[in-house]
Amino acid sequence: MLAGVSSSYYTRLEQGQANGASAQVLNSLAASLLLNDDERVHLHTLASHRDGTIRARVIRGAEAADPALLELIGSMPETPAMILGRRSEVLAWNPVCHALLAPHIVYDAPQHPTTRPVLAEMVFLDPAVHALYADWGAKSRAVVGDLRLAVGNYLRLTPNSGH
């Protein structure tokens, strides 16, 4: 109601069943939902497809860290560094990052898709990680925003689904 659209139209938009929402409608929704600038841009990006469907990319197989990035984080022995995948999985970390973030997790866990730590889970469910962030509220909002972005960009996000 705040956005000036019916609940049934809003539901169809949310489900991707309504075609061609105007910029005015999207801006009204963004204002009603109190979206920040990044979220507003993301809303317009999701709605920008002419037929109303999201052209999501399909991910096949498990992600792997780029060898150049592995070399980069290996060259920074005194700086905590990690490589995150699309689903916030830790694809790699250097020893300093591991010691700071998750010494209770086996160091080589990121090397195996079935045992990879997931930063989003760690931020919300691991009290030791939670305590690392002075502004946990801001970190949690950033993690949720990253996950929403990933869902909007990638069709299948289930690990090891092969799709």
Image: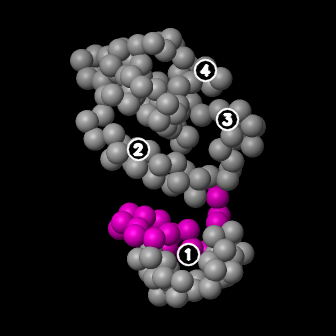
Q: What element carries label 2?
A: helix
Q: Considering the numbered disc 1 on the image, is that residue within a helix, a strand or a loop?
A: loop
Disc 2 residue type (three-letter): Ser
Question: Along the line of sight, which residue is nearer the eye, 2 or 62?
Answer: 2
Of mark 2 and mark 4, the one earlier in the sequence is 4
Q: Do the residues labelled 1 and 2 touch (CB within 8 Å)?
A: no
Q: Which residue is drawn at 55% across and 75% down?
A: 48
> Which residue is disc 3 drawn over?
159
CA distance separating discs 1 and 4: 37 Å
**How far apart in space, not on screen, are marks 2 and 4 (Cα)?**
23 Å
Give the residue type at disc 1: Ser
- The answer to whether residue 109 is left or right of residue 15 is left
CA distance for labels 4 and 3: 11 Å
Q: Is residue 80 positioned above or below 134 on the image?
A: above
Q: Is residue 65 magenta?
A: no
Q: What stretch is highlighted in magenta?
A: 33-57
* 1 vs 4, front mark: 4
Which mark sits nearer the N-terminus, 2 or 3?
A: 2
Q: Are the residues at dot 2 and dot 3 in contact (C-beta closer than 8 Å)?
A: no
Labelled disc at residue 140: 2
Q: Quadrant of the N terminus?
A: bottom right
N-terminal of the two: label 4 or label 3?
4
Q: In this view, does 38 lie to the left or right of 78?
A: right
Q: Mark 1 points at which residue?
A: 48
The image quadrant that residue 104 belongs to is: top left
Image location of residue 13, percent across then percent down: 64, 75
Tell me if residue 3 can be seen. Answer: yes
* Residue 45 image offset from top left, x and y in percent: 51, 69
Residue mark closest to the camera, 2 vs 4: 2
